[in-house]
Image (cartoon, helix red, strand yellow):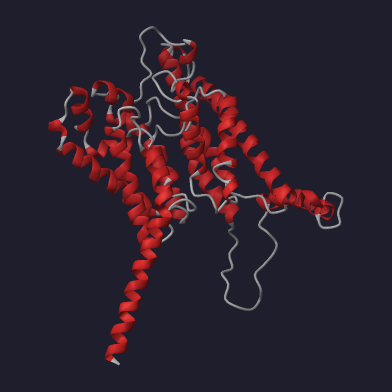
Amino acid sequence: MKAIQNLMDSLRPQFEPGGKYHKFWPAYDAFYTFLFVPGHTTPARGAHIRDGIDLKRTMFTVIIALIPALLFGMYNAGYQHFKAADMLQTVTFWDMFLYGAGKIIPMLIVSYGVGLGIEFGMAVARGHQVNEGYLVTGMLIPLIMPIDLPLWMLAISVVFAVVIGKEVFGGTGMNILNPALTARVFAFFAYPSYMSGDKVWIGGMLRGEAVDGYSGATALGDLATTGTTQFSVMDMFIGFIPGSVGETSTLAILIGAAILLITGVGSWKIMLSGVIGALFMGILLNGISGYATTPEMQGFLSVPAWQHLIMGGFAFGIVFMATDPVSAAQTEKGKWIYGFLVGFFAILIRVLNPAYPEGIMLAILLMNVFAPLIDHYVVEANIRKRMKRMKLQTVKA
């Protein structure tokens, strides 16, 4: 690392004001601060928090937390593919893992290549530092997409998410919607045949690489159409089910959640309240299951509330998406309200919306829009309480 730092230091004069490449200072600064902690310090006077961590280091912690879901997603992609092709008895663990890696790594390359290219271009054009937020978004986007989404569709979704979902608002810290979910919702409405149905979740099924009659339906897809699911609770918890790349394994997601909570990067209030909201809605739906008009709807309404936590993308969404510090609620009480409503609406949309048997994406985006309003009323309520206390103290005096 010392050799790299010496190289970067020797190149610095070329990018500083007056240097040959001074216009590209944001690009140089982005690479330097990604590799090394910035050298500038806080002033000697005044009250300041002095710490070696910065936004890039925080984002890197989130990336580490995503690695378990990423690695399992690679294995599961291969497992689901060879299971659909009836070849599980003839392949090894590494055959399955390498198949999935061969599918997912190109998605990561496209996501980071296109997204960071836009970020660097915007930073150079505006003359400001490169926003660090895409370090996480670049990994999140492939993890919430189907395995067989064409790379050019992924690239267009990334462009939409970065430009329309973030840069038009001013970049990282200014966006009102989660950029990764913005990419997914764009792909869902722009290319619905590649984002829904039974064939998009298993590699090769769109090209007919499966035994006749094999169903690639997800657990939620089964419930929406038949009222039951072919997968066991253990399969859904560990992740041996079809689904988006990084959303299938609740176990891997919980490992990531533990990393976020131990390091203090993720909000436990949003995670816990989201789970409470989902359980509350699930119990309410269990209570009205007897009023269902069809056996399929009755089966979906009767799913035990706790099982909703390990199905679909709920766990991934509540851990990595709902806790986005920019688009989520900022106040402490607001986080409880925000998380509860995310979980509440996620299960409500999942069960009662016949066109889309997964609600976490829409629930988070909906609450992203209302997060500033929640914070506003929390702050206003706090101000009113303080004013009442001041009046009481004045009267007593």
Q: Quarter-wise, where is residue 308 in the image?
A: top left
Residue at 46% x, 33% y is: 246
What is the x, y in percent for residue 301? 21, 32
Q: Is residue 5 above or below residue 362?
A: below
Residue at 58% x, 33% y is: 108
Q: Is residue 20 above or below residue 189?
A: below
| Extreme residue in the top direction | 212
Quadrant where the C terminus is found in the figure: bottom left
- Looking at the image, residue 125 sits to the left or right of residue 52; the answer is right
Q: Is residue 118 above or below residue 77?
A: below
Q: Nearer the viewer, residue 267 or 51?
A: 267
- Looking at the image, residue 294 sits to the left or right of residue 3; the answer is left
Q: Quarter-wise, where is residue 222 in the image?
A: top left
| Extreme residue in the left direction | 290
- Looking at the image, residue 64 sits to the left or right of residue 345; the answer is right
Q: Quarter-wise, where is residue 37 in the image?
A: bottom right
Residue 258 shows up from this direction? no
What is the x, y in percent for residue 6? 79, 52
- Looking at the image, residue 322 sits to the left or right of residue 284; the answer is right
Q: Nearer the viewer, residue 362 or 150?
A: 362
What is the x, y in percent for residue 325? 48, 53
Residue at 83% x, 49% y is: 21
Q: Is residue 212 above or below residue 282?
A: above
Residue 334 shows up from this direction? yes
What is the x, y in percent for residue 223? 27, 25
Q: Exactly how many numbered labels are in the figure?
A: 0
| Extreme residue in the bottom direction | 397
Residue at 43% x, 56% y is: 372
